[in-house]
Amino acid sequence: MEPSLRLTTPGTNGTGLAQRPHLASDRIMDARVTRSPAHGTRRRLAAPGLMCLAAVLAAGCASAPKPAPEPVGAGTRPAPTTTRGLESPRPVYAGPWEDPSNPLYNRTIYFDYDTAEIKPEYVPLLQTHARYLGTNTGTRVTLEGHTDERGTREYNLALGDQRAEAVRRFMIADGVVPDQLATLSYGEERPADPGHGEQAWRSNRRVIIQY
């Protein structure tokens, strides 16, 4: 018995079924099918990776220790409050010339009109101040010369200076160191009495010993 012969017609796969020719579109589809699982795998792998990274960062932030509060030192303690009222400043005692019961309290020497001559009645007063300055060589005074309003401004400034210099010479002769004595003339500019009569003029012709 002769072996049976299997005829294969072009376009069949040996089973007698017609074989579909491979087209270019099939190759493209095969390539898409081949690559799509890989892309899908990358997308599936990327999402869990991002979730893990977010979890690690969240855990790190949650576990970061908070800085401990700084202890309050002695230098930062609040100032203690007080309920006492404000005390008025106490007057500073400058010297015995501020005591009304002390002979140094009288510090004004008066002059007659248009003269710088020291009247005898003021000699004891000047001697008292000279003795104090002689025993307190660190104390300095300014001798301020004044006049009344009569006369020109320039004349009265010169007359006030002459009166201050007369007192200065007297105190130096009585033992006061010259460096302890300064002179200053105000003329008619600082009247003790702003009046315009003889009584006001008599009060304004003067030398004041200013400690």
Image (spheres, grey):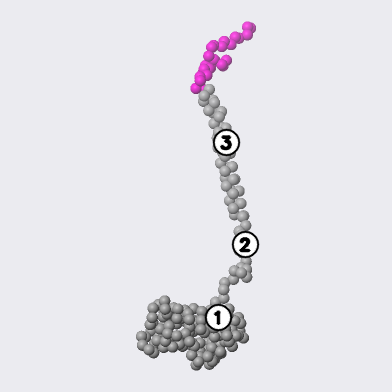
Q: Which quadrant holds the N terminus? A: top right
For label 3, the SS is: helix
Q: Tell whether position 153 is magenta.
A: no
Q: Position of residue 33 (x, y in %)?
A: 54, 28
Q: Position of residue 162 (x, y in %)?
A: 48, 81
Q: Disc 2 vs disc 3: which is toward the camera?
A: 2
- The residue drawn where x is 61% and y is 59% is 67
Q: Residue furthest left?
A: 196
Give 72 or 55, whichever is nearer the viewer: 72
Give 157 or 52, whichever is nearer the viewer: 157
Corner quadrant of residue 148: bottom left
For label 2, the SS is: loop
Q: Position of residue 38 (x, y in %)?
A: 57, 32
Give the Cα separation between the discs numbered 1 and 3.
Answer: 105 Å
Give the Cα separation between the discs numbered 2 and 3.
Answer: 45 Å
Per the image, the residue denoted by label 3 is 42
Per the image, the residue denoted by label 2 is 68
Earlier sequence position, callout 1 versus callout 3: 3
For label 1, the SS is: strand
Judge from the rendering whether residue 175 lies leftward or rightward of residue 117; answer left or right.
right
**Helix, strand or loop for the magenta stretch, by majority:** loop
Report the magenta residues as a range. 1-26
Q: Which mark is residue 181?
A: 1
Q: Residues within 10 Å of mark 2 (few under 14, many from 20)?
A: few
